[in-house]
Amino acid sequence: MEKTHITISDLSKRFGKKEVLKGIDLTIEKGEYIVILGPTGAGKTTLLKIIAGLIPPTKGQIMVDNQGTRQDITSLPPESRNLAYLPQTSDYSLFAYKNVWNNAIFSLKMKGEKSLPEINAIGNEVLDLVNLRHRYDALPYELSGGMKQRVALARAIATDASIFLLDEPLRALDARLRIILRTEIKKLVTDLDKTTFHVTHDQEEALAVADRILILNEGRIIQIGTPQEIYQRPNTIFSAYFFGVTNLIPVSLKEVQGEKVLFSVGKHTITGLTTYRGTSETPDVSKDEYVLAIKADGITVAPVTETREDGPNEFIGTIKDMYFLGKWVHLVITIESFPKQIIIAVPSTEMKNYELENDVTIKLDIEDIIHYNEPWDKIKHLEDT
Amino acid sequence: MLQRDRSQLERLAIRIANFTSKSRVNTAWYSFVVFFFFLLVLLPTIFVLGYVILEFTAIQNSVFSNQEIQAQILSALFYSISVSIIVSIFDLIFGLPIAWTLVRKEFRFKSLLNSFIELPLAVPTAGLGFSVALFWGVTPSVESPIFAVQFIKNALPMLILFHFTTTFPYVVRSLTAILEEIDVTLEVAARTCGASKFTAARTVTLPMFRSGVATAMVLSLAKSLSDTGGVVTLLATIQSVTQTGTTLISTWKHSYQDQTPLEGIPYDSLLPSMAFLAAIMIGIAITLVFVAKIIAKKAQLPFRKVYPSFEWAVSEGKAPQMRQIIAFGFLILFVIIPSFFLVVYLIQGASLAALASANWALFGQSIFMTVLVASVATVVNVFLGVPMAILIARKSHTFSRILDALVDIPYVVPSSALGFSVGLFWAFQPVIPVNELFFVIMAHISMTFPFIVRNTVGGLEELDTAYEDVARTLGAKPMQTFREITFPVIKFSIIAGAIMSFTRSVGETGATLAVSPTSTTAPVFIVNLIKVDQNYFLAALTTIILILISSMLIFTLRASISRAKRK
């Protein structure tokens, strides 16, 4: 790590009138595991294909550092780029007419640079890595989904490419296998010091394996950072809304009191910090419309007790619905004069404390109030889907 | 797991891959393919259009000043156009229920029926015309075999029956192909909402099926406008002097070549008249295609209203079964029996005398020539059609979309107009010396080129480009990618295209006659046997031999494809 491997500058792509990627700037370290996350149509696959050399960019440059020398690969054909690409296909892009062995050594055979004993040694080595040496003679249709993906990985490893491009490598696998295989892939490529791009739209998968997450939406990089940074300090409502269950509440700015900022919502006041969790942006007092993003698991809730007073950031609400989700229970709560219902996640072990139509006390942590200066009309479409 | 040592051959293959993947070599190859298409396929096909413009004074002097020529052209066009329109309407009315049944219903003998429907495709139309005439027509000069209907005297109903027999299998095949792609669950959804089967099919599936219907119509219209050999033998068998557009071209061409003047037509007027007629027919065909494309995109089906009680009635009880029985009875009576009726004649007429009197030398020669022409045309088309298909299916330029539209032109142009145009082109150019065999081969190349391209494009569209992408990133050069990844998948489509091209070429009469009336390919031999020599027995025998050659190929195709599918 700590050595630049890939530098992408001002990369744009148009298909006809549609701008799919807009001014992508990115620097990736050697051996980094980057997860590209975004909704369908964000440009994730296009970005991967441009890096692979399968489609030319409209504008911009891709540089790769290789043992101290920096090379511009923007116009190289894919076979000269020394990278391995696993696209999205129903059967993990294994060549259906070739058996496991011939799939695994495909690249070595095509390049024709290695001698036969060398090819055999590499073939055995990569199939050992994915524990599939005993199935060398199987045809792809005889393998399970997980096995196919392992063969595809072995085939990529055999190329000796330093960059791996994985387009949704875990789709179409059942939930348990996804979790096993994502860790396996991460360990494999990290041990081999490969620089990896992993495209997904699954936020949990992204959080679990990424060194850094890159959030892409409508062709732009929204945010790039470690999973913790992205989760705890989302720089836009889009990033905030992408992870977990997030309550978006339209509010108006009341006043700024030193480090604190007061928002009014209905007849209540919510207090936040001007600089939440390290961001240095101070709220613009001239703007009135704000949206708060509060994660469902960041709200404290308790049954109402008579001794309790209504303190700052504390509200009384009524439970209108409860959804049991295994480990968690989601409480849907109505607070008087709030414009929307609030969803709160509590551990299901505490479920017995709550009942429908009961009142509860809700407490928001001042540090969890993330606020964005955006009019609600521009945001509410996020909740439509 | 042990691999044998990489041989010299494999090293050579890698060197070839490196060479062919150089962008300059690549560009040169594709340029050659495009050049070939324009200069050797498309331009000859429509050359006559330019010729008409260049020689317009000659046409004015001969065609517009001669009542007889005008009358003949008008009558021929009347027959061609009215027959093709009527036939395509019948094709659709009876084709839809049959295609529907073949795709959506399970019943006994389904697979038998599936192969039955393709059988007439293997019969060369020259023999088919004779066969249909024997079954339906009153045949003054031929002793009619038993079971013959012997009923029709006039040319128009005869032509309609004949063209129905030839086009119906094509229409059903293209309808089933598209129907198979339409998701049946939508119809099911409509039925759970209370629509009867008939209403659901009519209002949900049929509108999605619009482009398929348009394609089938074009196919039917184009084929009915195009056939020559069958029309000649059909009309000769019932001794009618009626001419269609295509037979008129070949009659005139024959007289032009032999320098035997026709009544009421000066010799000098022949060439301009033929060019004029051919240009009109090509014009009609190309217009047809574009009209059909517009219809497929824009047209709305009539009867938006739903008539629940009537439509429930035809959906339930005995009604659907009756519909099927009627449709299949129709298929057997109007397509299968007429196609193979000449077998009855052959069995009845077999005698030593008939066998002894036959011209076996010419028979052998014509079969040999047919196979030679078909093989050369097919091989050339495979080598140039496959890269063309790649250009169309894999490159996303506007240019490849233009190519996509142009490739179909030889497909719809009436073959005798095409043959005439190709002959005109090669006689016109000063570079290559005139050679009859060369002319015939070039005409067959132009005519069958779309078969290879269309089939290969179909195969390429089935293969996700992601596999080729992966191979490239894994270090395979474009040529290696084609050989290792693309070819194994599309080879069956190429074989299918090659076989279609070959059988089409084997059965073709019109193009051969119009390009060179003296080249005796087997279908031309059949036409001459029926029209001139009245040796019907040998004509039937030649037809059967051609059927055997074609059906062996179709059988191989089916076998190889089903083997691949099992894999």
Image (cartoon, rainbow, N blue to C red):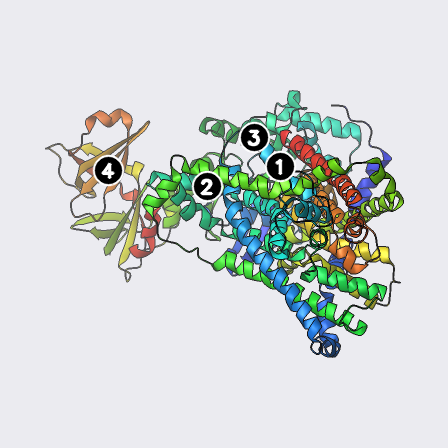
Q: Is residue A284 left or right of residue B450?
A: left
**Residue A176 left/right relative to A306:** right
Amino acid type, label 2:
His
Q: Nearer the viewer, residue B418 or B141?
A: B141
The numbered dot on residue B109 is: 3
Q: Which amino acid type is marked by label 1?
A: Phe
Discs 2 and 3 carry the same chain letter: no
Q: Is mark 1 on a helix, strand or loop?
A: helix
Image quarter in which the N terminus of chain A is found:
top right
Expressed as whole percent of the image width and height from the top left, the position of residue A141 reads 60, 28
Q: Residues within 10 Å of mark 2 (few under 14, many from 20)?
A: some
> Which label lies toward us, 4 or 3?
3
Q: Tags 2 and 3 in contact by the CB under 8 Å rule?
A: no
Residue tagged 1: B116
* Corner quadrant of residue A232: top left
Give the chain of mark 4. Answer: A
Coordinates of residue A341 in the picture (x, y in percent): 23, 43
Q: Can residue B490 be seen in this view?
A: no
Instruction: State the residue position of label 2.
Output: A201
Give the amino acid at mark 3.
Phe
Q: What is the distance, in whole Å, between disc 4 and disc 3 at their CAs?
A: 61 Å
Q: How far apart are marks 2 and 4 (CA)?
A: 26 Å
Contact (Cβ within 8 Å) of mark 2 with mark 4: no
Amino acid carrying mark 4 in the image: Val
Mark 4 lies on a secondary structure that is: strand
Give the CA distance from mark 2 to mark 1.
Answer: 51 Å
Mark nearer the viewer, 2 or 3? 3
- Give residue A332's mark: 4
Q: Do labels 4 and 3 share a chain?
A: no
Q: What element carries label 3?
A: loop
Relative depth, front residue between B292 and B338: B338
